[in-house]
Amino acid sequence: MTDPFAVPPPEAQRPPPSADMLVISSQVVRGSVGGRAGFVLERLGHRVWQVPTVLLPWHPGHGRGTRIVASDADFAALCADLAGSPRLREIGGIVSGYLGNAAQAGPIAALVAAVKAANPAALYLCDPVIGDAGGLYVPEATAAAIRDRLLPLADIATPNMTELAWLTAAPVAGPGEAVAAARTLGPARVAVTSAPAMMRGKIATLLVSATDAVAAENQLVAGAPSGTGDLFAALLLQRLVIGMPDEKALAHAVAATFEVLVRSARAGADELALTIEQSALVRPMAMVDIRRVAAPRRPAPQP
């Protein structure tokens, strides 16, 4: 029986030249979370600009470690330097993730605005990395700064169910409620991760726009390493930047994320094996189920 996750032969062609990408997120010395999304985008043929928001020895799930955050003045000056670059027009995509503190949101917003002024076609994906499992794991001031300063600028957002509920102050228990809440968040496209699936033993990612809502479902993976949200956000942004239609971009991003996750779990890795399994980033072989999702009807306004 053929292994559906067998490594395909190396690609014979180099990827075509494409837009630069700006990655704004945490940096870990060891691991595959946060700003390691830069590697994913480089593997897909993009030159990456990288702004670290915090330096950590490893993902906090591996234990306590030293946390280094640039002073507010230094971080703002770094972002201002980048905002003044004559090469901003080369950036076609921006992804922001975990912030070191609430004060970083303002300089990041100014940098995003500068990129969009230089290249109006650039897409900004805001991954609001603020919580999980029903609660916040960042200070509320940081979560509010992402909500108030960054999400209004975003073309795409990728909250999980907990984050979506907090950001919209709405009940988000199932796919229908998630679709309804996503449409109030602000960005034109909202990808809701870790959503309930129709089939038992599966998990869904919903891609919601004003007129459509699509779910991509895959099997749950026990003992999953951290970093799947960062990986998915980078993959989705890349697919959209190169012009892939929404539904196809969702399917590709979910399939590649799932394949890397499965391969990493099979190997017993405590981090996503991005370098070893990089073939899946380019040409995923895993299959995902795609279906349409209907949001509950809102009650008609009373006269």
Image: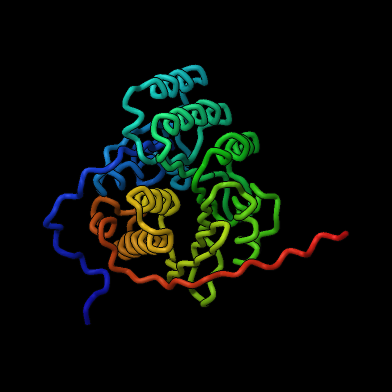
In depth, the one of 38 and 101 nearer the eye is 38
* Residue drawn at (35%, 49%) of the image: 238
Looking at the image, is 108 positioned above or below residue 6? above
Determine whether, in the image, residue 42 is placed left or right of residue 142: left
Residue sitting at the far right = 303
In depth, the one of 195 and 295 nearer the eye is 295
Looking at the image, is 150 positioned above or below residue 85? below
Q: How is the image coloured?
A: rainbow
Residue 36 image offset from top left, x and y in percent: 35, 43
Determine whether, in the image, residue 217 is placed left or right of residue 198: left
* Quarter of the image where the C terminus is located: bottom right
Residue sitting at the far left = 12
Residue 156 image offset from top left, x and y in percent: 49, 48
Residue sitting at the far bottom = 1
* Quarter of the image where the N terminus is located: bottom left
* Residue drawn at (35%, 22%) of the image: 85
Determine whether, in the image, residue 49 is placed left or right of residue 169: left
Residue 199 image offset from top left, x and y in percent: 51, 77
Residue 118 image offset from top left, x and y in percent: 40, 29
